Image (tube, rainbow, N blue to C red):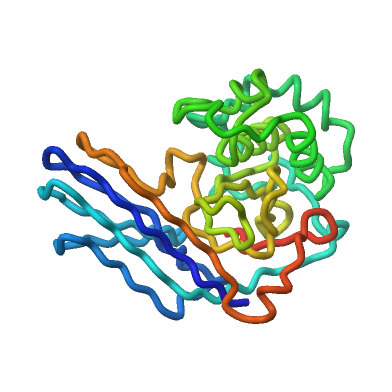
Amino acid sequence: MKYSVGCTLEYAVPSPSVFVFNLAPADTPYQSVDYENFTVLPEMPVETYIEPTLGTRYHRLNVTAPSLTVRYHATVTVTPEVRTPGDVHTIPPAELPLVDFPFVLPSRYCQSDQLMRLANREFGSLPFDFARPLAVADWIHRNVDYLVGTTTPLTSAFDIATSRAGVCRDFAHLGIAFCRALNIPARFVSCYAYDLWPRDFHAIFEARLGDQWYLFDPTRQASTGGLVRIGTGRDAADVSFASIFGPARMTHMDVYADAGDAESERQPKQWKDHAVSSARAA
């Protein structure tokens, strides 16, 4: 499936600032960038880096001008792997590869240690398979209201479990925290999402089951089969679309993700019927 994705970001920069952007689709076996263009106005050197394990791509700019405009566009081919949910199972801690150990531990926004009692009460009796993280996503969708403006960049999973309101970033953090409380490795995924409205950067979580990482969107706003992965991390702190060191202020943002072929336009909203993966476990 092909998608056309990108964004335009504009900033006021009253004094020299450093920007680190995470806007480009990740370099993974499940998606390939067929074409891309990264434009910066005014023109200046752009430093790039690809994280070798997860394929997350970063661009750094040292901005001295009073304003900055960043335009990114790419056409991407995505080939997610779809399996029958009953065929995938959780991995006991004694057998979990140590490379994934960080993804079962609490992190800045995902205090799984503070949510163990709630997680085990709600999900502890479920089978040790796809049903557990799916039930987590279903619970969040039923019990947490999607309300823009109710949270801040400091809001954590524990806050959302208490307030029961947030946006995609918060839904993903709570899903990660619940999974980790159940000893299921879970990660934060930032992405472009086809058919998302209003258009914006999107966030979901993925959980390791067997030899794959499977995608879950508790907001139910986008198809897990129609996502273009941007960044992967322990939580949002690892993959913010823009990290700014200085007094810069965003003045405009536009994000899009459009179908690039007929197959993409027919993409079903695969929330329950399939286990969708776009990352192979190490």
Residue 279 seen in this snapshot:
no
Q: Quick one: 268 or 213, which is closer to the camera?
A: 268
Which one is in front, 247 or 47? 247
Residue 268 visible in the current orientation: yes
> Is residue 130 depicted above or below 249 in this figure?
below
Residue 124 position by quadrant: top right
- Residue at 45 percent across and 30 percent down: it is 153
Q: Quadrant of residue 279?
A: bottom right
Q: Is residue 152 left or right of residue 210?
A: left
Work out which quarter of the rendered image holds the C terminus and state it.
bottom right
**Residue at 34% in and 57% down:** 58
Residue visible at 20% across and 54% down in the picture: 61
Residue 96, position in %: x, y?
66, 47
- In this rendering, the answer to whether 157 lies above or below 24 is above
Q: Image quadrant of residue 163?
A: top right
- Residue located at (27% from left, 66% from top): 39
Give the image location of residue 123, x and y in percent: 82, 32
Count of numbered badges drawn on the protein: 0
Task: Note whether 5 is above or below 236 in the view shown.
Answer: below
Which corner quadrant holds the N terminus?
Answer: bottom right
Residue 280, image x, y percentages: 62, 63
Measured as percent of width and height from the top left, residue 276 is found at 72, 61
